[in-house]
Amino acid sequence: MREPILRAIAMPPKMFWAPFLPAAMNLAVQFPFMFIGMGVLNMNPIIFIPPIVIAHVFLIIYGAREPHLSTMLKTYGPMAAKGSVSMYKSKGTKLAP
């Protein structure tokens, strides 16, 4: 019997056609650099637009090949679950066949 594919799993969230988490990380890193450059160094913000767009286009292309890129980052990143730890000492192997 075939099981239905849930839309939340089949269609991961996107931000402007790129996987959400990498796109948010891209903007979270590049916008502060742009504002620091504008405020401290009096740079023109137009200089910072092409790298933002190029990085986002790269994420769109890579996200088309691997649509679950956000899930992969969550799984292997610093916020990944570290597994369960038993609070009590036990002898032997539990739940083994």
Image: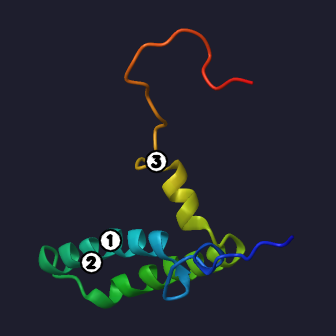
Q: Identify the disc placed on residue 34.
A: 2
* Neighbour tally class for label 3: few under 14, some 14-19, many 20 plus, Cα within 10 Å: few
Instruction: Looking at the image, tell me whether mark 2 or mark 1 is earlier in sequence order.
Output: 1
Percent of width and height locating residue 40: 12, 73
Instruction: Looking at the image, tell me whether mark 3 or mark 2 is earlier in sequence order.
Output: 2
Specify the amino acid type for callout 1.
Answer: Ala
Looking at the image, is 82 positioned above or below residue 67? Answer: above
Specify the amino acid type for callout 2.
Answer: Met
Q: Identify the disc placed on residue 95.
A: none
Instruction: Looking at the image, tell me whether mark 1 or mark 3 is earlier in sequence order.
Output: 1
Gap in angstroms between the C-alphas marked 1 and 3: 20 Å
Looking at the image, is 88 positioned above or below residue 30? Answer: above
Q: Residue at x 42, y 80 (%)?
A: 52
- Quadrant of the rendered image containing residue 44: bottom left
In the rendered image, which residue does mark 1 sit on?
28
Specify the amino acid type for callout 3.
Answer: Ala
In the rendered image, which residue does mark 3 sit on?
80
